[in-house]
Image (spheres, rainbow, N blue to C red):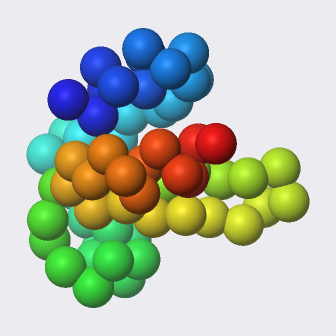
Amino acid sequence: MVKQYLKMKGQNYSEVNIEDEPSRREEMVTMTGQMSVPVTVVTSDDGSQDVTIGYNLGKLSSAIA
């Protein structure tokens, strides 16, 4: 659902599947403190990051605004 939403909004994204890249799992846990997926990280032009866990449309909408 997150991918569909980002496509609908015309946002480019890259996907990391922790099943295919298990080394990235620790990075996700360090960033979020949990094992829940999906995790969406929106990086602003200034380098700051907004992390959304799950399909939280309100938080995701404000992150890409």
Residue 41 on image: x %, y %: 48, 54
**Viewed as shown, does residue 61 lie left or right of 55?**
right
**Viewed as shown, does residue 11 lie left or right of 20?**
right
**The C terminus lies in quadrant:** top right
Residue 54 on image: x %, y %: 21, 55
Give above or below for 6 relative to 31: above
Whether residue 37 is visible:
yes
Q: Residue at x 43, y 16 (%)?
A: 7
Residue 42 on image: x %, y %: 56, 51
Give above or below for 53 relative to 20: below
Q: How many marks?
A: 0
Whether residue 21 is visible:
no
Q: Residue at x 54, y 52 (%)?
A: 62
Residue 37, quarter of the rendered image? bottom left
**Viewed as shown, does residue 38 lie left or right of 40?**
left
Of residues 14 and 60, the one drawn nearer to the viewer in this rendering? 60
Give above or below for 61 relative to 5: below
**The N terminus lies in quadrant:** top left
- Name the residue furthest front: 58
Residue 19, quarter of the rendered image? top left
Of residues 46 and 28, the one drawn nearer to the viewer in this rendering? 46
Give above or below for 7 relative to 47: above
Q: Residue at x 57, y 23 (%)?
A: 12
- Name the residue furthest right: 46
Of residues 11 and 32, the one drawn nearer to the viewer in this rendering? 11
**Viewed as shown, does residue 12 lie left or right of 22?**
right
